[in-house]
Image (cartoon, rainbow, N blue to C red):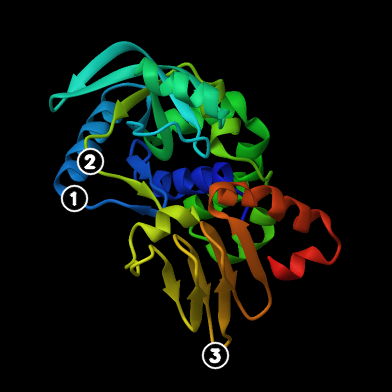
């Protein structure tokens, strides 16, 4: 039951609260590639130390290496504290996905990091934030917290409660409204494989830069990403820099440069009375 990240965070806080009312926990997206585990663990430990030391919400930001328009940005403010020799700054503001011109300004300034959706906070801090900024969400989850406290069967309560929670991201519901957010620029490598071009960076290319999986034939084409399942043959002729994904019930064809706009396509499908069957 997908209700976006704010209900997921609220549920996680309730689960941790049942074990330790003062516990500190992390929220980490699953569609990222990180190779440097040593630095990743070091940054996480520093973030946990920061979150345990004060009533702050900690986010780990990614230093941008290009003017990406598919990521949200975080503007860093004044220096806050240092933990394990890792510098934390107060968050000045969160910015939605910018235009290319604005993204270039952010990159040049050095004041911005990408919002990777990595957060570390204590149970009291996140619950206090939700109570202040999203009281309806917290109230909607109250039956779950009571079930955890009383030892009642959780699955039945979740099945009844969770679908009715507001579908909203934790950025909108909590972080963008809060004044106690700090950011740590990541020292580790990072790649978001939630976008098709990023996936290509982690697969073998042919001599023309094409990344293919399944029964695929590319004739006079370069730098394409082509994926197909089953025995269906997908053939490209004279196409460059495209993403083609074929499954049993749907086919996506898009220029690689516009692949991050897929959310607009998904919204259109969600609005269509017959579109949901493809999602």
Q: Which mark is residue 231?
A: 3
Mark 2: give few (<14), some (14-19) or many (20+) Cα within 10 Å. Answer: some
Q: Quadrant of residue 203?
A: bottom left
Give coordinates of residue 213: x percent, y percent.
44, 76
Give SS at disc 3. loop
Residue nearer the viewer, 179 or 72: 72
Q: In the picture provided, is 274 more to the left or to the right than 152?
A: right
Residue in the picture at 45% in, 54% down = 197
The outermost residue toward the bottom is 231
Q: Quarter of the image for the N terminus: give it.
A: bottom right
User: Is residue 131 in view from this perspective?
Assistant: yes
Q: Position of residue 26 (x, y in %)?
A: 35, 43
Neighbour tally class for label 1: few under 14, some 14-19, many 20 plus, Cα within 10 Å: few
Q: Position of residue 121 (x, y in %)?
A: 37, 34
Q: Give the secondary structure at mark 1.
A: helix
CA distance separating discs 2 and 3: 40 Å
In the image, taking residue 130 as reference, residue 28 lies left or right, namely: left
Between 104 and 169, the one nearer to me in the picture: 104
Look at mark 2 in the image and give the residue it sits on. 188
Residue under label 1, please give it: 37
Label disc, if present, on residue 51 of the rendered structure? none
161 w.r.t. 186: above or below: below
Name the image quarter holding residue 98: top right
- How many numbered marks have been drawn onto this rendered protein structure? 3
């Amino acid at each position: 039951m997908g209700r976006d990240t704010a209900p997921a965070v609220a549920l996680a806080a309730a689960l941790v609260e049942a074990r330790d009312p003062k516990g500190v926990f992390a929220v980490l997206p699953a569609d990222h590639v990180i190779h440097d585990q040593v630095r990743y663990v070091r940054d996480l430990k520093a973030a946990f130390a920061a979150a345990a030391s004060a009533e702050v919400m900690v986010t780990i930001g990614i230093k941008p290496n290009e003017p990406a328009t598919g990521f949200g940005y975080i503007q860093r403010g004044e220096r806050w504290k240092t933990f394990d020799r890792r510098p934390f700054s107060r968050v000045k503001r969160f910015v939605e996905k910018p235009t290319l011109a604005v993204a270039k300004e952010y990159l040049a300034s050095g004041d911005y990091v990408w919002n990777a959706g990595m957060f570390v906070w204590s149970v009291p801090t996140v619950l206090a934030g939700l109570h202040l900024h999203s009281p309806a969400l917290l109230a909607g989850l109250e039956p779950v917290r009571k079930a955890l406290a009383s030892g009642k069967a959780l699955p039945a309560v979740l099945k009844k409660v969770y679908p009715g929670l507001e579908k909203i991201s934790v950025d909108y519901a909590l972080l963008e409204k809060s004044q106690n957010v700090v950011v740590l620029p990541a020292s580790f490598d990072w790649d978001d494989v939630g976008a098709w071009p990023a996936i290509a960076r982690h697969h073998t290319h042919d001599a023309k830069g094409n990344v293919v999986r399944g029964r695929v034939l590319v004739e006079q084409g370069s730098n394409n990403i082509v994926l197909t399942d089953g025995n269906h043959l997908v053939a490209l002729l004279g196409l460059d820099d495209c993403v083609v994904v074929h499954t049993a019930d749907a086919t996506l064809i898009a220029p690689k440069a516009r692949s991050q706009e897929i959310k607009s396509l998904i919204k259109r499908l969600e609005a269509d009375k017959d579109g949901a069957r493809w999602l």
